[in-house]
Image (cartoon, rainbow, N blue to C red):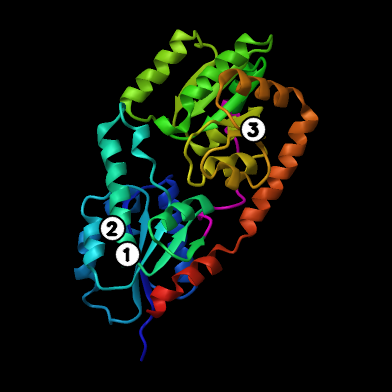
Amino acid sequence: MTSQPAVHQFLPSLAPRDAIGNHTLGTLRALRRAGVAGGIWAEYVHGKLFGVAKRYQKYPGWLSGLRRGRRALLYQSSTGSDGLVDFLARRGEPLAICYHNITPAEFFDGYDAIAAGRCRKGREELSRLVPRATSFLADSRFNASELRSLGAEDVAVVFPYVGSGNVAEPDPEHERRLRTGKRGIDLLFVGRMMPHKGVLHLVRAAAALRAGGDVPVRLFLVGADGPAAHMAVLRRLAETLRLEDTVFITGSMPDDQLAAHYATADLFVCLSEHEGFCIPLLEAMRAGLPVVAYDAGAVAETLGGCGVLLGTTHPMLVAETLSRVAADEALRRRLRDRQLSRVAELDGFDRDAALLSALRPVLDG
């Protein structure tokens, strides 16, 4: 009797409210819907997910009581590992790689030597693991092109599992505070304050926008802190430009408070210089917030022809664009309508079918 097929996922870190973690969990649910068994194995597992995943060092012993059959491994690649890739390279099961992009280490040089080293190691490990793999997946065409540059063939693009439909209800008190304090244009950026996310460009653009017009401006930077040295530069820049009443670095916040920002902001602004997919853009579009973004990495691909794409991060040119879009209600309405159509297109993409098709070679191998 043929045993049930299984795909076991591996990744360096599994944590809640993390894009790679959400995709890994979504992949697990998709595989189970298709009758494919398997588990999640990681070097680090957040305490809230202990019941969902295990440390990868337990993998051989845990499998010892199972019948052997069509069993494959799927590596969710996004950073360097501490032995996990060496472990996967030694295994005999068919291997698939899903590439979520590894940030170029140069963005971290001067801010965080450990993070820079981990990025460099991740890219080296990926190039070493590609010849071992049978199937390749990426969550954007941009990521697929990077994977092909390492020798991968037939890379399937499977948009990430990010959930759909349910935007959190805004926290009423937080929304009231935001609306009460609003005097002009409110700009919103959501994402971790990492060097490649362009937050320094955002601060300079906010300063230019404030200096160039009579309308007050508030820029809310919502997300967890990045490297300490980078945060120091960010805060020092805001202080030097005297933006105490303009730039607000909020840190991470609950979903309902974030929803209040989406409900009250005028524009979502992203000047990130490297993105493999950029899920916050999708969240902004879903919330009906017009997007202005720098055309880097997979940003244009994520937007899919909607939003306002910038070819520069020059603060004066960014400020001019933001002022123009904020002042034109008809334009913002058209942007919202086109963005919601893009959301519907992404939500309608059959991720399960694309995933199973991409994994078929390792399941049949």
Kindly identify which residue carries mark 3: 263
Q: Position of residue 4 (x, y in %)?
A: 38, 80
Please, what secondary structure does the residue beneath circle 3 have?
Answer: helix
> Is there a contact, CB below 8 Å, between mark 2 and mark 1?
yes
> Is there a contact, CB below 8 Å, between mark 1 and mark 3?
no
**Mark nearer the N terminus (2 vs 3):** 2
Q: Position of residue 44 (x, y in %)?
A: 27, 50
Q: Give the number of the mark in front: 2 or 3.
A: 2
Kindly identify which residue carries mark 1: 131
Question: In the visual, does 183 lie left or right of 337?
Answer: left
Span highlighted in magenta in the image: 158-174
Q: Is residue 265 magenta?
A: no
Kindly identify which residue carries mark 2: 128
Q: Give the number of the mark in front: 1 or 3.
A: 1
Instruction: Decide: is 351 above or below 252.
Output: below
At label 1, the amino acid type is Pro
